Image (cartoon, helix red, strand yellow):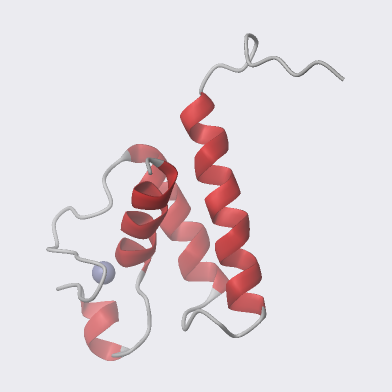
């Protein structure tokens, strides 16, 4: 079967979605300490490339209130950052 990307408007978006589905599986399997709700919000941020604003976000930490309330869990900003990093590798 011939596969073409000609009609795909944003190839980088499909990469993002592949990373998103991998993260979904990891959360359901208990391998990623966060919620599906946060992952969905993180995907939204990643698609808008606004994952950090107005917070300072790294893979290990984030200055947002949600991360302060749930230490050890991934917040939506960290998830967005991770999705973007993975999708551009
Ligand atoms: Zn955050």
Residue 28 vertical placement versus 87 (above, below)? below
Q: Nearer the viewer, residue 54 or 1?
A: 1
* Residue occupying the far right of the picture: 1
Q: Nearer the viewer, residue 46 or 12?
A: 12
Residue 13 vertical placement versus 45 (above, below)? above
Residue at 41% from the left image edge and 51% from the top image edge: 86
Please identify the quadrant where the N terminus is shown.
Answer: top right
Residue 57: name its quadrant: bottom left
The image shows residue 70 at horizontal and vertical percentages of 33, 89
Residue 81: name its quadrant: bottom left
Residue at 55% from the left image edge and 54% from the top image edge: 20
* Residue occupying the far top of the picture: 6
Residue 76: name its quadrant: bottom left
In the rendered structure, the answer to whether residue 28 lies left or right of residue 89 reads: right
The image shows residue 42 at horizontal and vertical percentages of 42, 58
**Quarter of image, ligand 1:** bottom left
């Amino acid at each position: 079967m011939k596969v073409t990307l000609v009609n795909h408007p944003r190839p980088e978006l499909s990469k993002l979605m592949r990373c998103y589905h991998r993260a979904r599986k990891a959360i359901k399997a208990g391998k990623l300490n966060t919620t599906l709700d946060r992952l969905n919000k993180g995907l939204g941020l990643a698609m808008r490339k606004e994952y950090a604003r107005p917070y300072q976000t790294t893979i290990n930490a984030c200055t947002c209130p949600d991360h302060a309330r749930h230490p050890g869990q991934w917040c939506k900003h960290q998830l967005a950052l991770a999705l973007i990093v993975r999708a551009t590798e």
